[in-house]
Amino acid sequence: MKIVVIQGPNLNMLGVREKQIYGPMRLEQIHAQMKEVAEQNGVEIEFFQTNLEGEIVDKIQECYGEANGIIINPAAYTHTSIAIRDAISAVGIPTIEVHISNIHRREEFRKVNMIAPVCASSIVGFGPFGYHLAMMGMLQILSELKAVHDAQMAAQAEA
Ligand code: DQA
């Protein structure tokens, strides 16, 4: 089982950018914690950060046939990117969207969300802890998928 974590624009600036909104934690620290959880659960994990929309689309497409789950914070592209939304839809991989801040209680333009309708779940406003919650949620989704898959295999073996 493999989870791919995709981080959008300016998230490489965590720990520096608007600490009153995003907190002091750096992206590397968030990823280190997620890696630990993945290892404890025997799941492979890959991290990818870019400031470019097309690179996010490419990465989502690369996940097809490779990843079982995607955790994504599309950052500002959340509010504008039909291309990222279409890519998530196209690959059909269970996806959890994370936002460090509560996008619903900020500026009006952040209330527009192109991504949420194609995600299994959205986690907002928990700070960096949201990534941990996303890991928990994704592990649950993956274990449910595995149970369905195992049951199908068992039924086929009996037939
Ligand atoms: C964000 C919220 C977005 O509105 C913003 O553009 C970001 C970060 C968050 O994690 O809270 O860059 O996705």
Image (tube, rainbow, N blue to C red):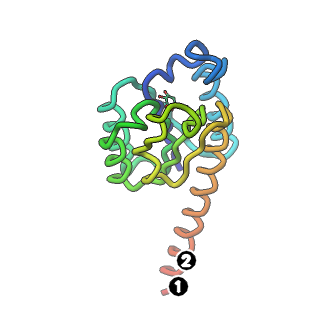
Per the rendering, the mark at residue 154 is 2
Residue drawn at x 48%, y 40% is 111
Q: Nearer the viewer, residue 100 or 44?
A: 100
The amino acid beneath tag 1 is Glu
Q: Residue extending furthest bottom? A: 159
Disc 1 packing (10 Å; few <14; some 14–19; many ≥20): few
Q: Which residue is mark 1?
A: 158
Residue 117 position, x and y percent, is 44, 53
Q: Are marks 1 and 2 in contact (CB under 8 Å)?
A: yes
Disc 2 packing (10 Å; few <14; some 14–19; many ≥20): few
Per the rendering, the mark at residue 72 is none
Q: Horizontal placement of 125 versus 94: left or right? A: right
Q: CA distance from mark 1 to mark 2?
A: 6 Å
Q: Secondary structure at mark 1?
A: helix
Residue 84 location, quadrant: top left
Residue 1 position, x and y percent, is 53, 50
Residue drawn at x 66%, y 43% is 133
Residue drawn at x 32%, y 48% is 86
Q: Nearer the viewer, residue 137 or 139?
A: 137
